[in-house]
Image: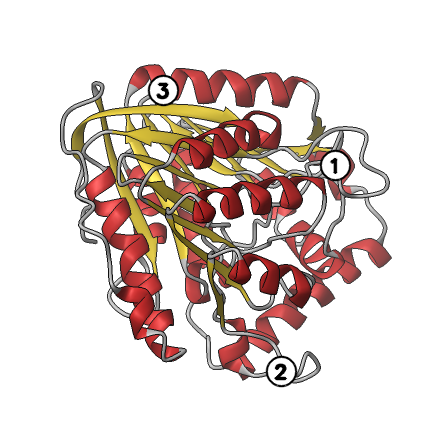
Amino acid sequence: MSLPDFVEGNCITLLHSGTEYFPVLESAIDSTRQEIYLETYIFQYDTTGIRIAEALKRAAQRGVAVHLLIDGFGSLGLPGKVIREMLAAGVRVLIYRPEFFSFRLKRSRLRRMHRKLAVMDASLAFVGGINIVDDCYESDALFPRFDYAVQIIGPLLEKIHATARHLWMLVAWVYFKKRWTNYLSVVSNNLPAGHQRASLVIRDNLRNRHSIEHCYLRAIAVARKEIIIANAYFLPGKNFRQALIKAAQRGVSVILLLQGKSEYRLQYYAMHALYGHLLDAGIRIYEYRQGYLHAKVAVIDGSWSTVGSSNIDPFSLLLAREANVIILDRIFAAGLRGSLQRTLEVSCPVLQHSWRGRSRIKRSLNWICYYFIRMAWGLLGYRRD
């Protein structure tokens, strides 16, 4: 496994859900003077989407070079009229793999741009799992979606900025928008802003196919005390499951905080097929049911943390473009761990004896969903565990 490149001297701030993230993001857009890159899987034209779209238009109208990259499937519901209004205001908008025939199932359709990343003037960045969508857009939501992002200042900006520019260039060339790659001479600020070591880890379908998964596996392999993983769509392959089970067998406290409200039923029921094996190994599982859990974070041994867009499922680990930040800092880890612990206290533990006592119908449904996903993956050519 290759090791990520860690950079010293960063100041990284944890942001809890859209309640904290969107006001800070909007303020950062309004403060930008030269250049903005914003990547998001979902751009929903709701209250939040309108706020961010208006902020981007204001920035473009005062001369900022604004680059908005949205995914063609995740942002399928964004009206064309809204995109045209942003273009008219000077916002450069590109769509990653636009969807024209929603009923066609092709392997290439699953290669989505799932990153949630923003860079302002190469001096401030945001990375996480939060889309541009209202926290409480579901009709039955009593609590905001449970998610995280990080705000980053410091030398890590050089890599984040280069990563955003690179993907923009690739998509712009596909659209014959070479003129949109005439970059300003914006140089990343490499001056130390704090004391945190961090790395940006991306997943793509070229040189970084397994980078995020390898980082997880390495951290799990050397864990000695505690692993806490909060993940919205948890459907790991054999290697990942075995790594968690081996950690539990050597005495590590392994805790999984998973989705308790069904958002996508097939994945939700397939995930349950794995519970019995994990519970038998001594892994503790909690389900968050107060709202929709959308987080993709982990804390290991109180020093290693990750916040990003990557789920632990085949879609994120084998197909989509993802971006996670890994932080080696005990103070940051303590803050994230504290937030997760508070959420665990209001979540529902999955007990081994009651789980084993479920009806055969429920257990069969779980395994049918699980093998349906595995079969679909095999038919698409993804047989790797």
- Residue 84's label in the rendered image is none
Q: The C terminus is located in which quarter?
A: bottom left
Q: In terms of secondary structure, where does tag 1 sit?
A: loop
Could you classify mark 1 by the number of other residues whose Cα lies within 10 Å: few (under 14), some (14-19), or many (20 or more)? some
Quarter of the image with the N terminus in it? bottom left
Residue indicated by mark 1? 136
Identify which residue, 93 or 359, lies in the foreground: 93
What residue is shown at x 35% (from left), y 62% (from top)?
A: 168
In front: 224, or 339?
339
Task: Give the total of numbered labels.
Answer: 3
Separation of residues labelled 1 and 3 (CA atoms): 27 Å
Query: Of label 1 and label 3, which has the lower sequence position?
Result: 1
Residue sitting at 62 percent across and 82 percent down?
A: 105
Look at the image and tell me whether residue 118 can be seen: yes
Quarter of the figure with residue 76: bottom right
Tell me, for residue 105, which label it has, or none. 2
Mark 3 residue type: Phe
Residue 130 coordinates in the image, percent (x, y): 55, 41
Say which residue label 3 marks: 332
Disc 1 to disc 2, C-alpha distance: 30 Å
The outermost residue toward the front is 62
